[in-house]
Amino acid sequence: MNKKYIFIDLDGTIIDHSTNSIPESTKKAINLLQEKGHEIIIASGRAPALFYGIDKTLNIDSYIASNGRIVVYKDELIHSEYIDKKVVDTLVKLVEKEKIDLAFESMTDYVLNTDITGLSSKFSEVYHLKQPEVHYNYHLENDVYQMVMFYTKDDYKRFEELFPTLSFHFSNKYGIDINAAGGMKEIGMKRIIEEKGISIEDTIAVGDGLNDISMIKFAHCGIAMGNAQKLLKEAADIIADDVNNDGFYKVFKKLKMI
């Protein structure tokens, strides 16, 4: 079998949030895949600051972060795309007026602009994240690669009309990931493939969330976890078992890769 490049989501794919841990069977599968010469690449909506050492624990030195806006391959930054500063500032002024909290993701930080509603703590609880500190107007002095708007109303599409150069996708029911328009995690996949001359036939992607759909469709083999969103399952080639039922291990065993 040719070497495969396996792009894996974190939350709900290898991290079981019912225990806030990576199942031992998943760790074993990743280790066995690496021993057989396959390459594991993290592909997450999280900023690098929110990996909490997961990449090092799993001996992974390549990752796609902030939904494709930061790409590191073999510990080398090969792609970065920050959001236009004027657009960020315009959005900040709007959400401040509407009393909506917003978080910024940079290369090194995940911080809040304001903490008025308390929704950011609920968002953090879902993913077991450390509650971010408030750094008001952080965006004025730092490049922002992704934002999170803490919002629960179903009228969020109005923001897309106001900001056509941005994309808005619910990460969980308390917050919306905001990126430059034009793709998600597959942006990072394309960058790595182009940089290293990888054949698309040698790519596999595994995910569970709506922000994984484009990645799942782009990969030669797209795998949805059993606990995945319905729309992702519809886009996938294979549906695995749930993350908390050894789904990651089982699917690669079934594929005879471990």
Image: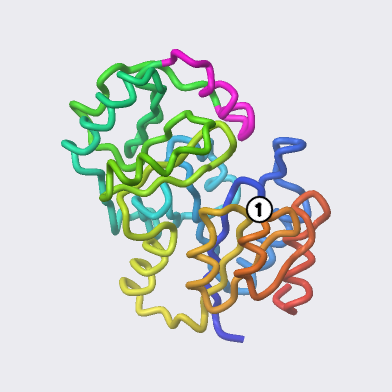
Q: Nearer the viewer, residue 221 or 3?
A: 221
Task: Give the image location of residue 174, x and y in percent.
Answer: 56, 31
Q: Where the C terminus falls, by quadrant?
A: bottom right
Q: Is residue 37 above or below residue 121?
A: below
Name the residue located 27 percent from the left edge and 23 percent from the top edge. Answer: 138
User: How many numbered marks does the figure carry?
Assistant: 1
Name the residue located 62 percent from the left edge and 61 percent from the top edge. Answer: 231
Coloring scheme of the render?
A: rainbow
Q: Where the N terminus falls, by quadrant?
A: bottom right
Magenta-highlighted stretch: main secondary structure?
helix
What range of the chain is rendered magenta?
Answer: 115-129
Q: Nearer the viewer, residue 67 or 26?
A: 67
Q: Is residue 138 above or below residue 191?
A: above
Determine the image quadrant of residue 191.
bottom left
Task: Give the image location of residue 78, x and y in percent.
Answer: 29, 59
Residue 121 falls inside the magenta stretch: yes
Name the residue located 70 percent from the left edge and 59 percent from the top edge. Answer: 225
Task: Give the image location of residue 39, x and y in percent.
Answer: 53, 68
For residue 74, side relative to residue 87 (left or right): right
In this view, the residue farthest toward the bottom is 1
Q: Nearer the viewer, residue 61 or 23?
A: 23
Mark 1 highlights which residue?
13
Determine the image quadrant of residue 6.
bottom right
Task: Give the image location of residue 37, x and y in percent.
Answer: 58, 73
Crowdedness near tag 1: few (<14), some (14–19) or many (≥20) residues, C-alpha within 10 Å: many
Q: Is residue 108 above or below residue 77?
A: above
For residue 190, side relative to residue 44 (left or right): left
For residue 27, side relative to residue 93 (left or right): right
Residue 126 falls inside the magenta stretch: yes
Name the residue located 56 percent from the left edge and 21 percent from the top edge. Answer: 121
- Amino acid on which the number 1 mark rests in the picture: Thr
